[in-house]
Amino acid sequence: MKVLFLAPQPFYQERGTPIAVKIALETLSKKLALSSRSQHAIDVLCYAEGENVEIPGVGIHRTPTPRCLEGIRPGISLKKLLCDLFFLFSTLTLVVKARKNQYTVIHAVEESVFIAWLIKKLWGIPYIYDMDSSLSLQVTEKWWWSKPLYPIMNLLEGIAVRGSVAVAPVCDALSAIATKHGSPHTVMLRDVSLLPLTAELNDCRNHTLGLHLTKDQPVILYVGNLEHYQGIDLLVDSFALVRDHTAQPHLVIVGGTPDSIEKYQHKAAHLGCATTISFLGPRPVSQLKDYLTAADIVVSPRVKGNNTPMKIYSYLHSGKALLATDLATHRQVLDEEISVLAPAEATGFAAGLRTLLDNPELRRTIGENAQRRAEALYTLSAFETQLAALYDEVRVRVSEGGSQDGVVQEEA
């Protein structure tokens, strides 16, 4: 099987979708039993920026783009859409070059599904829709002026879903959207914990965080980008309401760009929290376990979106108490047995923080429950099983319809 993997992202960067892409490529490489000496059976097309990574049997191709289009941030943006024009031409070039040994299937992540749809129409190559978000919802939530275009974008999204050989949503909400659009076959590819299978957590938090806290001071931790939809304004506003708690909590925020960090540092100072909120900036994924070890409470204050944040799975696996906004983005994975779910407004979220600060035993109980569930459902082994099921089904479907689509069939 020869796969063209379309990843319209900076690759590799340590953030949501690029991390998920890397995990998928490593898993698919093992699934296809590729080695470093194999001819590349997986070609990946990604944006020009990002670090090179070595994955057996995987060749990385980058779109040639001007420097002014570098610095792609998470989520949809005009800069990203401009990069996608270059991405389209690069995809067409790869397909034309491979015409004597054509791709068996295209694995299309996010908006690249529309390019994959076009290629199927031109060359008959089937595609998998790796559905990390609802594109029609993402665009209309980002730009208010695009809301009248929602019916058209929703129609196009449906066409892309129905044209695929299979859809791989990352969460229940997206699975429901795929089903509504008439997905021919759906296999859930949930994100997974980035912690080791058995997370042995050793407390060395002051060294890790670079802070001077007493052993009784609870640390509240957020990990991720600082984009608006993540709810950082909500988090800071909520923490300001509990900063005088007798337990003397300290909020630690890991991630963000220099501009976003400066913005929220000003906000924290304005609210009188300059000394009780620490912004540590980006940290390598390899250090995630250390930061989760240092925490007593982990938080996901997201206010928009329907896909579950990737951080949730590592939060659960860490065995630390989790507080999240009570929205569908979280409810499709979380419940009251493994988390505290609070309203997505400052007073309600602060009440959730206060509940956890007041109850160490509750923190311990939901943390233990969360870790057991994560070990059972949200580890790499679970993802490998899901991806194998997806490609086994795709292989059957491509074999059955390959001759009429003009696709070259190859055994892995």
Image: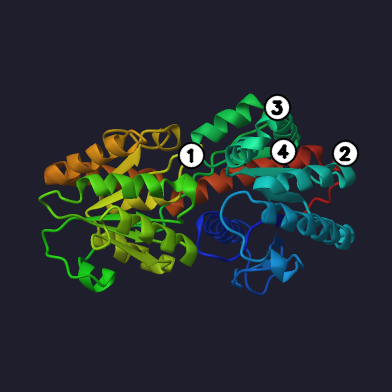
- Report the amino acid beneath label 2: Gln
- Report the amino acid beneath label 1: Lys
List the residue tagged with mark 4.
Answer: 165
Q: Residue at x 27, y 71 (%)?
A: 208
- Distance between the alpha carbons at the discs numbered 4 and 2: 14 Å
On screen, residue 359 versus residue 288, left or right, reads left
Q: Residue at x 74, y 33 (%)?
A: 156
Q: Nearer the viewer, residue 200 or 314?
A: 314
Whether 133 is drawn above or below 274: the answer is above
- Distance between the alpha carbons at the discs numbered 2 and 1: 43 Å
Mark 2 or mark 3: whose residue is earlier in sequence: 3
Looking at the rendering, which quadrant does residue 184 occupy? Answer: top right
List the residue tagged with mark 3.
Answer: 151
Q: Residue at x 34, y 51 (%)?
A: 315
Mark 2 or mark 1: whose residue is earlier in sequence: 1
On screen, residue 230 versus residue 146, left or right, reads left
Residue 93 visible to an observer of this rendering: yes
The local crowd at label 4, few if under 14, some if 14 to 19, many if 20 or more residues have their Cα within 10 Å, is many
The single residue placed furthest to the front in the displayed view is: 270
- Report the amino acid beneath label 3: Pro
Q: Nearer the viewer, mark 4 or mark 3?
A: 3
Whether 247 is drawn above or below 57: the answer is above
List the residue tagged with mark 2.
Answer: 404
The colour scheme is: rainbow
- Distance between the alpha carbons at the discs numbered 2 and 3: 33 Å
Q: Nearer the viewer, mark 2 or mark 3?
A: 3
List the residue tagged with mark 1.
Answer: 304
- Report the amino acid beneath label 4: Val
